[in-house]
Image: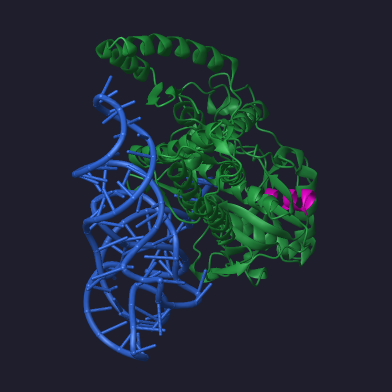
Amino acid sequence: MTLHVTNTLTGETEPFEPQDPDNVLLYYCGLTVSDPPHLGHARSWVHVDVMHRWLEFLGYDVRHVENFTDVNEKIVARVGEDDLGEDESEVAESYVERTLSDMRSLNLLRAEVYPRVSEHVPEIIDLVETLVEKGYAYESNGSVYFDVTQFDDYGKLSNQELEEIESQGDPDERSEKRHPADFALWKAGGVDADAIEEHRHEGAAEPEKACETAQTWDSPWGEGRPGWHIECSAMSMTHLDETLDLHVGGRDLVFPHHENEIAQSEAATDATFANYWLHCELFEMDDEKMSSSLGNFVTVEDAVERWGTNVLRTFLTAGSYNSTQLYSDETIAEAEERWERLERAYEAAADAVDSPDARTKVEDAEFRATVEKAREAFGEAMNDDFNTREAQSALLEVATAINSHLEGREEYDYRGLREAVEALEELGSVLGLSFTGETTGEANLAGDVVDLVLDVREQEREDGNYERADELRDELEALGIEVQDTDDGPTYRLPSE
RNA sequence: GCCAAGGUGGCAGAGUCCGGCCGAACGCAGCGGCCUGCAGAGCCGCCUACCGCCGGUUCAAAUCCGGCCCUUGGCUCCA
């Protein structure tokens, strides 16, 4: 089977065919940098990252663009808070840096470009002008609005009729609008102090003062700021093309954001804006979604610190990108179990390959066949709309095959083990899992110390002092170091990764 | 109210587009056995689901059609 994806536009799972058979233009709707990224963002990022990796695995050259919205009232509302910065752009930049660092810690492939709104105002203005010239937009009191009645397909992504769409944007803007569903492409003036007040945190600058730091730009309609939706159209066209292959984003953006992107882009270019629209579903916790606005989130930084990258990625890919996923201590602990099972099998296989018991003449046909089958299953799963959960299952089957092969055997199938190790490394990396994370100097030191303690413990065991030996093991365990006694002596695993 | 997604074992979560291989994957939890000084890990086996409810189509439905109930998301900033 070739790659199939579920397209929000049609509601169907379709074969994926990029415009250019060798290249994929991928745009991901990034975030507004006004809060620390949370696990919900991480879930989408990781899924997009896995899409990116799988497309490359299939041989495509992926041009991946991901924007940062750095012009927004909520950012202005943070001015003066903590050490974020003294004006809108400083605050935005400090969150951009934090976001990029969170992304690195999640082992995400870098996008080709991370465009910012503030750096694309000329392109935005051009686009708005085009829309005005073509009669799709109109100016009103220095602001420019998109006229939804002029765009026949309005509502095609979210499946809504224009009559059903009550209104968008600030209620007080309505008087300036011809149709309640019209949305702002360009907003006159600066930022409104009331809007700041709404999002302001303790310790931030006074709204009046914060407003003064908001950025504004000159335009044919006077001083103002870009509207929320137009940026993605302008940036994706600038860095990719008029027609994208893959446009990905969170489910909560379908309406109005993505709907508006389609309207303004297609009205301006007369070309299809994106051939495939993919939407990542949201986390569910205690029967509601996780989100910045509800404040019920876990930051990426805390999560990485607590669980580590591999556990987190195992967790985040434990469901399909387009199904909601339950966030709880139990579900994340379960992911940890799964990752550790994989990791232990990997280590066992890697050790066995290097051991003198691995013989090139030994052949376990069933073992090899199982690994081969798991490889195929992994590919089938990924091609089936990036079914990461099934892909994980395939990996786990390799783990079981390894353990089973190693069980009670004197001699090992060298080639079979090598193939299993390679399968885990190669397929694992599609999910962004790393079995061979570089060991830091600190970890090496810790390892040396653990070796020392285990030597002492072995002596105690030989002397029959099991009580003392168990104590040592318990104490190591309390530090998160897992000790296992095997026929070849004790082995251990350090807590992180 | 309108739009969208979903309701599968103790938990979690595939499968539903292309009906039979699904009495239902993988994993976690639980149980039994092996291994072990013990424990853990591991191996082998077992356990628990007729797939929201009702009706229909079909030789055959978790999968198709109709109705109903419930949950979540969007319609305001949001991945």
Within the magenta stretch, is there residue A94? no
Query: Above or below — where is A423 with respect to A154?
Result: above
Q: Looking at the image, which residue is at 66% across and 69% down?
A: A151
Quick one: A332 or A67, which is closer to the camera?
Answer: A332
Image-based side of A95 in relation to B20, left or right: right
From the rendered image, report the letter of the chain displayed in green: A
> Which residue in the rendered view is the most extreme toward the front?
A361
Within the magenta stretch, is there residue A231? yes
Q: Position of residue B58 (x, y in %)?
A: 37, 91
Q: Main secondary structure of the magenta part?
A: helix
Q: Position of residue A231 (x, y in %)?
A: 69, 48
Question: Which quadrant would residue B24 be assigned to in this image?
Answer: bottom left
Q: Is residue A141 visible?
A: no
Q: Identify the magenta region.
A: A230-240
Q: Looking at the image, which residue is at 57% across and 46% down?
A: A416
Image-based side of A71 in relation to B24, left or right: right
Image-based side of B79 in relation to B71, left or right: right
Question: Which quadrant would residue B34 be assigned to in this image?
Answer: top left
Quick one: A148 or A180, which is closer to the camera?
Answer: A148
Q: Is residue A152 visible?
A: yes
| Quarter of the figure with the N terminus of chain A | bottom right
Q: Position of residue A10 (x, y in %)?
A: 57, 70
Quick one: A211 or A199, which is closer to the camera?
Answer: A199
Please identify which colour was used for chain B in the image. blue
Q: Position of residue A223 (x, y in %)?
A: 73, 41
Query: Above or below — where is A128 with respect to A192?
Result: below
Query: Above or below — where is B33 with respect to A98?
Result: below
